[in-house]
Image (spheres, coloured by chain):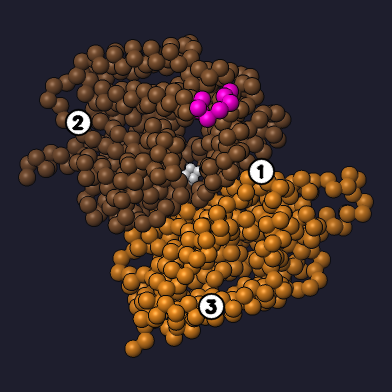
Chain colours: A brown, B orange
Amino acid sequence: MKITFPHMGNIYIAGKAFLEALGQEVIPPPRCSRRTLELGIKHSPETICLPLKIMIGNFIESIEKGADTILLVGSCGPCRFGFYSILEEGILRDLGYDVEFIVYEPIGEGINKLKENVFKTLNITNIGEVLKAARLGWRLIHKADQITELANETRAYAKDSSRVDLIINNYHRKVEQVFGEEEMMDLMDKTINSLNKVERKKNYEPIRIGLIGEIYTLIEPFVNFDIERRLGHMGVLVEKSLTPTIWLDHHVLKFPFGSRNEKEKHRLARPYLKTLVGGHGRETVGAAIGYEKRGFDGAIQLLPLNCMPEIVAKPILNRINRDLEFPIMTLILDEMTGEAGFITRLEAFVDLLNRRREEDSVV
Amino acid sequence: MKDKVGIPRGMFYYDYYILWENFFNNLGVEIVLSPETNKDILDKGVHACVDEACLPVKVFHGHVDYLKDRVDYIFIPKFISVYRREYCCPKHLGLPDMVRHSMKGLPELIKPKVDLKKSNRDMKRAIIHTGKYFNKSAGAAIKAFNKAQNRFQRYMESIRQGAMPIHGIKYDEYNPSQILLLGHSYNIYDRYINMGIVDKLRANDAGVITVEMLDTHTMRKHTSGLSKRIFWTHGQRIVGGAFALMDEGLIDGIIYISSFGCGMDSVLMELTERRAKKLGIPFTILTIDEQTGEAGINTRIEAFLDMLKWRSKDEDNLPTHGEYIHSR
Ligand code: SF4
Ligand code: SF4
């Protein structure tokens, strides 16, 4: 069994080390590229949302490298994501690829099936080992996220922000060479060390922007034109409202109650939206209010074209923008989005936030 | 003075209006229904609603706009789930929220939450909630609803006999070709946004079937073979209905009407088209949005019907039987 999974930001780093530590053979998905996207567009239904298209590209590229098993997380509504597995399976079968799909469906769909799938993919035989594996996975994801965050912070404060890119590029290169948990942790610690050594500006108060919106677009730099890095180089401190760590904490670790962080977003969203709307629509609304309360300068919503929950969130964000005088910009992403226009809008937004600060300091 | 409740003629109006109408009538509440969609309503909707939304949601905003100065309340239920373990589209889940945050000067919205995901009991809460606006006791509200429900069941029965929802036109018994008109109720039955496609098909001697005419049990049975249960109730109806009619060989072709950017359709079209391809049943998609022109739609329909005619003429001497003819 040669396992692969969709490429989503830094998840492949933790996923690779995790599965290797459990004795599985892993084909980590190659990082997303123009080719990934083109393969995806060619073979996916035209009207499906962007994440599925990229995943199809990921799978084809992994299969080319020898993968025969695809690991996925499922869902049962209300959003389209729940149908990804059935559509993807159909597409790959039509292309003549004989791969096995293993989908971790929510517990509500039947605990036995889930157990069977977990045991099979993780190469383990009892619940005790599951817990051990889960702790390991958690440590890895957590640390991978920590690096992403530290890199973002360092970029904003760095005297020379290009140093951060050098360190991160080096880290990504080495990820592919190391094997298993220990070597990965070691590499991660070294990376953290180097990031901490980057020289920072003194007495600098960066503009702070919260990134909100659909989870895949938030996490995967290829689809969001590397928004975190770009803002970092503009001296902006960015925070993402959703990361793999936040997702795992809410859906797995604190199951079935949910994490404090996400419940707080629901609480904040209440005056504007009281119920779920699928995907992370409600969390997007709550996160926007949260960033306003924490004194951020603004927020950016990432919306993959035609994403249903984020479209529901959009008029609500417009309203929050008016009510709280909190700048929120929506960026729509799809395969046709041009990079140049995207960057122009980012720069204009940062300019706006800078001007607002100056005006405030005059008053 | 009697309170007036506005009901926008959009979205689930096409599914549940008869139920709502009877319910409010039984409560002694006066209803104001917005007129059939027209250019003005569409324009107002497009203006009020966020650009990214699908056509039916925009049209719905237009109907709300029409009603807002004419009534004391507007009725926009929040449809989360109408069936155990299933959901409605995220935009139905957020419909009252989208409306209330996009539009100014609205009267009070009555927006009972309908969430039958866990059990049918939640319906009661929604009924009592609505009754309270008109000072009705829980008992009175429930009684009014049950009576309306009975009436609604009879109406559903007549649809299964082949009557078209809302307009109540019976479909013709015999026709050279039977077309399954597939898609969301508000795309199929709103004659303005689909440019009267039902009449157009009939004028061309085609019979029209819609999935609302089938019974739920049959539809559910036909999707049970999929590796994933269809957790959208209205999607289940579309896929299940199409599968049932295709599997039983009751239709000659399928026209899927989809609003541009509909997230649910991207999945449903793929599932139904895949099956149609396999069975060699002609399948075509008409995408509608606020810019769709009537001429284009006419051409597409005529071409599709011509293809069907040509196909049936050649049926007897078709070289490879069941050869796949696909138009898109
Ligand atoms: S949340 Fe948006 S991007 Fe994700 S599956 Fe749903 S519609 Fe697609
Ligand atoms: S099902 Fe499609 S058409 Fe209906 S509200 Fe949802 S996205 Fe719009």
Q: Residue at x 32, y 41 (%)?
A: A261
The reply to whether the C-beta atoms of the residues labelled 2 and 1 are less than 8 Å apart is no
Quote the CA–CA distance across marks 1 and 3: 37 Å
Q: Between residues A348 and B178, which one lies in front from this camera angle?
A: B178
**Residue A270: which quarter of the image?**
bottom left
Callout 2, which amino acid? Pro
Q: Position of residue A79 (x, y in %)?
A: 50, 48
Query: Would residue A7 be found to the left or right of residue B216 on screen?
Result: left
Q: Which residue is mark 3?
A: B146
- Which region shows up in magenta? A123-130
Callout 1, which amino acid? Ser
Quote the CA–CA distance across marks 2 and 3: 61 Å
Element at label 3 = helix
Callout 3, which amino acid? Asn
Mark 1 surroundings: few (<14), some (14-19) or many (≥20) residues within 10 A: few
Q: As displayed, is residue B134 above or below residue B296?
A: below
Q: Which residue is mark 1?
A: B227
| Quadrant where the image shows the N terminus of chain B | bottom left
Element at label 2 = loop
**Residue B106: which quarter of the image?**
bottom left
